[in-house]
Image (spheres, grey):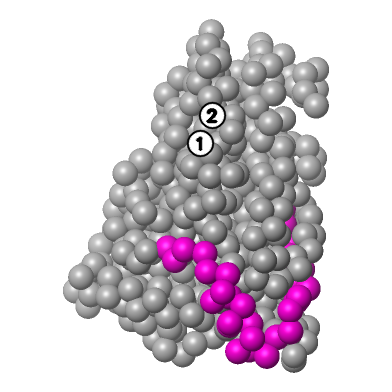
């Protein structure tokens, strides 16, 4: 279906961006979708940001300094910043936001910044974050949703996610679920000159081929998530340009070990059954069949572009070993398994390939096609057995693993727990020295090969398609579209 007449005429400067799914709630502390981060990048400034080389750069904090013991982070805040509702941004507002991230019921940011003991207002435009222990990952966490600054008065209201108020270059205008999110230019933005559109429209279109059809028809200006099978089509179209970058994210299968109402005799409580399922998967073949060889098979959370990527070969498929593990675990084949899968054609194809592969090892795999935000809700509440989902990755390794694997991680939807792994992850957080952190992450990744709380499948390149009239677009490895400097040629 083409969007056509439903969109405004080109007379006002509008940028229309295609997304692979509808974002979840627009509250940075409660949100967890990759797609929501596109909207937050335009709506909510963060204390710090990253550049295209993933270096931390100033945001609403113009400078910062660590104490000698690594346990206090002092941030000097930008003056003259206002929120979209006219509230002033200052140290008290920054403290309110960080306190809210740590204490709000259901906050998914708690474990990201759990090293923070307290936030102190040390001047009208200065805050000090006092930490329980040094935390090498903290600054990088503040470049994302944990560092997003919301208007305090608005954030106190129970319906904040329906009417989000931040201080970014664009303010919230309207949202129609599963159809569009509209942002309009914020005229009092501190860096207004870097932004050139009156209106931004985010359009969730789960089917990559439909997104491409809209791009080719001129109804989208830019889209993320060009399918591997469509790359040649984009390259051959004289009106379109392709931009791609190796991403930080992974896709995998999360096993529900102990979240919600998992039956006491559920076979996936036994790590051998989880390992058997993983052993039955041919990751190379999956990459060739579904992704035309453009993706990278995975066995860990750290992408090949991460300096912390653990040099551990992805094991080849071993059906005999999978069967032996099932037998050792006392499982009689065939074992019927339910897998939650996002309702888009690419994910469905992955599911069907997995279905055929694992059948040979003794698993009968039922695919439960589910809208993406609903899948995440079910995963979080424990209403699932296996779930096909991933993470868009973070520049610091802690951001791609701690929340999912640590016993207290707010994204640990399988409730995996291993005290030794917790200790390694905590130690790795507390050093800024890569030489000290790397061996700890090596140990974690090797331990997870047999504990198998998540069967990592592949790392995704970030592939964007854009109309050639879009000027100044730079793809970032975190996959988020940033609008500074973007223009539309007449």
Q: Which residue is mark 1?
A: 463
Horizontal and vertical percent position of residue 215: 64, 23
Horizontal and vertical percent position of residue 259: 69, 80
Q: Is residue 153 magenta?
A: no
Q: Is residue 318 magenta?
A: yes
Quadrant in the picture for the N terminus: top right
Question: Neighbour class for label 1 at 10 Å: few (<14), some, many (≥20)?
Answer: many
The magenta span reads 314-342
Q: Which residue is mark 2?
A: 231
Q: Depth check: 43 or 422 in front?
A: 422
Q: Is residue 469 above or below residue 110?
A: above
Mark 1 or mark 2, earlier in chain: 2
Q: Residue at x 57, y 51 (%)?
A: 286
Q: Depth check: 150 or 86 in front?
A: 150
Residue farthest along the front direction in this orientation: 320
Q: Residue at x 42, y 39 (%)?
A: 245
Describe the element under mark 2 as helix, strand or loop.
helix
Marks 1 and 2 in Cβ contact (< 8 Å): yes
Q: Depth check: 268 or 148 in front?
A: 268
Number of numbered markers: 2
The nearer-to-camera label among 1 and 2 is 2
Q: Residue at x 40, y 68 (%)?
A: 398
Residue 31 visible: no
Q: Depth check: 13 or 399 in front?
A: 399
Res 414 → quadrant = bottom right
Q: Is residue 362 above or below residue 43?
A: below
Residue 35 visible: yes
In the picture, measured across the screen, residue 141 lies left or right of residue 263, that is left
In the picture, measured across the screen, residue 323 lies left or right of residue 71, that is right
Describe the element under mark 1 as helix, strand or loop.
strand
Q: Is residue 218 above or below residue 134?
A: above
């Amino acid at each position: 279906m083409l969007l056509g007449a439903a969109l405004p005429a080109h007379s006002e400067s509008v940028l229309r961006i295609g997304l692979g799914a509808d974002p979840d709630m627009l509250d940075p502390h409660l949100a967890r979708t990759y797609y929501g981060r596109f909207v937050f990048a335009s709506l909510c400034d963060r204390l710090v940001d990253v550049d295209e080389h993933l270096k931390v750069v100033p945001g609403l904090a113009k400078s910062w300094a660590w104490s000698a013991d690594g346990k206090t982070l002092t941030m000097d805040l930008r003056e003259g910043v206002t929120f979209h509702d006219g509230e002033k941004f200052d140290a008290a507002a920054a403290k309110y936001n960080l306190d809210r991230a740590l204490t709000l019921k259901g906050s998914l940011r708690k474990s990201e910044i759990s090293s923070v003991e307290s936030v102190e207002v040390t001047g009208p435009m200065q805050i000090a974050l006092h930490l329980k222990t040094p935390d090498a990952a903290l600054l990088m966490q503040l470049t994302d949703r944990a560092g997003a600054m919301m208007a305090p008065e608005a954030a106190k209201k129970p319906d904040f996610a329906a009417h989000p108020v931040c201080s970014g270059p664009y303010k919230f205008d309207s949202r129609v679920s599963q159809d569009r999110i509209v942002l309009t230019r914020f005229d009092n933005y501190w860096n207004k000159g870097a932004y050139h559109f009156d209106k931004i429209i985010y359009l969730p279109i789960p089917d990559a081929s439909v997104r491409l059809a809209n791009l080719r028809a001129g109804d989208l200006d830019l889209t993320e998530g060009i399918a591997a099978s469509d790359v040649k089509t984009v390259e051959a179209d004289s009106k379109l340009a392709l931009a791609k970058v190796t991403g930080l994210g992974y896709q995998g299968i999360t096993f529900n070990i102990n979240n919600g109402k998992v039956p006491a005799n559920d076979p996936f409580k036994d790590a051998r059954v989880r390992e058997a399922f993983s052993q039955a998967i041919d990751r190379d073949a999956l990459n060739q069949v579904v992704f035309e060889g453009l993706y990278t098979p995975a066995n860990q959370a750290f992408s090949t572009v991460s300096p912390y990527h653990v040099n551990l070969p992805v094991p080849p498929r071993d059906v005999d070993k999978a069967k032996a593990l099932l037998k050792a675990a006392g499982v009689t084949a065939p074992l019927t398994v339910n897998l939650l899968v996002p309702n888009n054609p690419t994910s469905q194809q992955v599911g069907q390939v997995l279905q055929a592969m694992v059948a040979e090892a003794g698993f009968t795999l039922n695919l439960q096609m589910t809208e993406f935000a609903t899948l995440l809700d079910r995963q979080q509440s424990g209403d699932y057995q296996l779930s096909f989902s991933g993470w868009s990755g973070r520049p610091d390794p802690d951001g791609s693993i701690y929340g999912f694997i640590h016993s207290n991680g707010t994204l640990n939807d399988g409730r995996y727990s291993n005290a030794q792994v917790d200790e390694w992850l905590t130690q790795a957080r507390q050093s800024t020295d890569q030489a000290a952190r790397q061996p700890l992450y090596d140990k974690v990744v090797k331990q997870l090969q047999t504990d198998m709380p998540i069967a990592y499948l592949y790392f995704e390149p970030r592939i964007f398609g854009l109309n050639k009239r879009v000027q100044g677009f730079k793809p970032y490895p975190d996959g988020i579209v940033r609008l500074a400097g973007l223009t539309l040629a007449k």
